Amino acid sequence: MDAIAIISIFTLAVFVGFEVVSKVSSTLHTPLMSGANAIHGVILVGAIIVADHSETNLELGLSLAAIVLATINMVGGFVVTDRMLEMFKPKKNVNEKGGE
Amino acid sequence: MNSTLYSLIGLGAGVAFILALKGLSHPKTARRGNLIGAFGATVATLSVFLYVTPPRDGSPAHSLPLNNFWWIIGAILIGLIIGVPAARKVEMTQMPQLVALFNGVGGGAAALVAIVEYLNLGAEATTAEVIFTVFTVVVGCVSFSGSVITFMKLQELMTTRPVVFPGGRFVIAGTLAAVLGTSVWVVTALGTTPLLVLAALSLLFGVLFVLPVGGADVPIVISLLNAFTGLTVAASGYVLSSTLLIIAGTLVGASGTILTRLMAEAMGRSLFGTLFGAFTAKPQEASGSAEERPVRSGSADDVAILLNYARRVVIVPGFGLAVAQAQHTVRELADLMISKGIDVAYGIHPVAGRMPGHMNVLLAEANVPYDQLAEMDEVNPTFGQTDVAIVIGANDVVNPAAQTTPGCPIYGMPILEVNHAANIIFLKRSMRPGFAGIENELLYDPKTMLLFGDAKASLTKVVSALKAL
């Protein structure tokens, strides 16, 4: 890939990454960390690509291990983040239950 | 599928990740944001099965399906079988260490991807590709082994105190030098052995890097390793010519760095001090004399009487509350006090629990109304007018040593100033110090009353005593 194109993508992504999380209340730090963690699980895409490229047993073995780990990271990450956020449900519900 | 469509899907997934992070930054949109991220990741994963990346030598790509298709499917299923139940069943109190572990395996995956691609390319790899490979292997391995150590610290499989041994700083510096030296070796010599040596040294460095970090600083390290893993994903995106991986990895790297800084600020720590404290830290001995000093302990009835005549009460929940699963009982106590006309608020320290915002999650789980949760800056000025502060299973976040004792490990961390309240009640299991392992002077204060026992059992007794009054 063209070096300038890569540097451009990288630089813009850095700024977007800074901007989107610069004003987050500490309440959401944990879910945000967990969500970002799940996003880097997309390395699964890379693991699948190298599994396709693999020519030796060693390469295939390592890339399958990478697929297992990446799947755990991605799917587990999104599921646990959702469980955390489920608890921040609309307040109406909370008050109804609170008054029981 | 042609390459244009494949690239556009990758771009779409990148946009989904930006929307996901944006959504996760606001309480109302957080859940939707996470789902958008999950959707983007799923679509991106499916698209890989429909497009074969052509080989670098310019020959045409093989036809679908992917080579090793069933192996790939099997590995994904194994990942699902391990990951989904772990994420569904984990107790909310143990969630920080699960996040640490998920992060670690992501770093490990990125390192493996880089190693396989390196083995595959062999001598065809350009110098730039080798440099990015080296970066991914080093940082991915550090993230993996470092995360395993943070997991063990949080799970209390090992001591939560800083692990410092004589000459430790020389060992760490030596390992780092060896990692850098081997990196140069890999770039110049190009071989499998140097790369595997590099991976082993990096794993070792990850362990040494995290061992000296004290318990209270572990969340900062998890967040930093999370950012690291993001960068390794971006670097492997370069080697694999995947725009999607570059965007996703860089986003996580950048936002993770900001998040790490925000957390360090909330804890009043300099990032540098946290990470390189290892080079200056000395093994600490707890002073033996402190254990024998007198404390004032009371019964549940004493506590109930104190509460009954209070006008304003602030509850300071800590991780001990969550461990005892006492969130529901504490809400019951708060409701009872409110029905008696007492003004009740929860004072939430930004890092109460094991991670920033962890306590809010735990209390939300117990249906505590959101408007009763007061953040530190809000509640601190009111302690002067507070009759009773009840500290439940918290210690470090109310320890005045953070303001008065320069040189103690938590010095400079903002605290909840419960020492300004007229009366302080500590619910504790024992006199054992907090996660950071520091003695708390407040326990010996004459206006402090201690109620020993399991937080849930103690609270239940207080509730029934208060009802009887």
Image: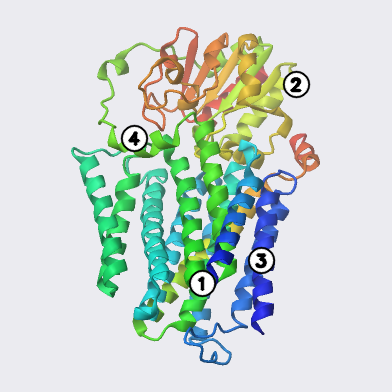
Viewer-proximal residue among B279 and A65: B279
Q: Are marks 2 and 1 on the same chain?
A: no
- Which residue is labeled 2 in the image? B339
Q: Residues within 10 Å of mark 3 (few under 14, many from 20)?
A: many
Give the x, y percent position of residue B95. Answer: 52, 48
Q: Is residue B285 left or right of residue B307?
A: left
Alpha carbon distance from label 4 to label 1: 36 Å
- Which residue is labeled 3 in the image? B13
Q: Are marks 2 and 4 in contact (CB under 8 Å)?
A: no
Instruction: Identify the image quadrant of the N terminus of chain B.
Output: bottom right
Q: Are marks 3 and 2 in contact (CB under 8 Å)?
A: no
Of tags 2 and 1, the one toward the viewer is: 1
Q: Along the polypeptide, which appears first: circle 2 or circle 4?
A: 4
Q: Is residue B20 above or below residue A98?
A: below
Residue B105 placement: quadrant: bottom left
- Which residue is labeled 1 in the image? A46
Q: Secondary structure at mark 2?
A: helix
Alpha carbon distance from label 2 to label 4: 49 Å
Give the x, y percent position of residue B38. Answer: 65, 62
Q: Is residue B465 above or below residue B123?
A: above
Q: Residues within 10 Å of mark 2 (few under 14, many from 20)?
A: few
Q: Is residue B226 visible?
A: yes
Alpha carbon distance from label 3 to label 2: 51 Å
- Chain letter of the residue carrying label 2: B
- Residue sticking out furthest to the left: B166
Q: Along the polypeptide, which appears first: circle 3 or circle 2?
A: 3
- Which residue is labeled 4 in the image? B277
Q: Is residue A25 above or below residue B398?
A: below
Q: Secondary structure at mark 1?
A: helix
Q: Secondary structure at mark 4?
A: helix
The amino acid on which the numbered mark 3 sits, given as a three-letter code, is Ala
Of tags 3 and 2, the one toward the viewer is: 3
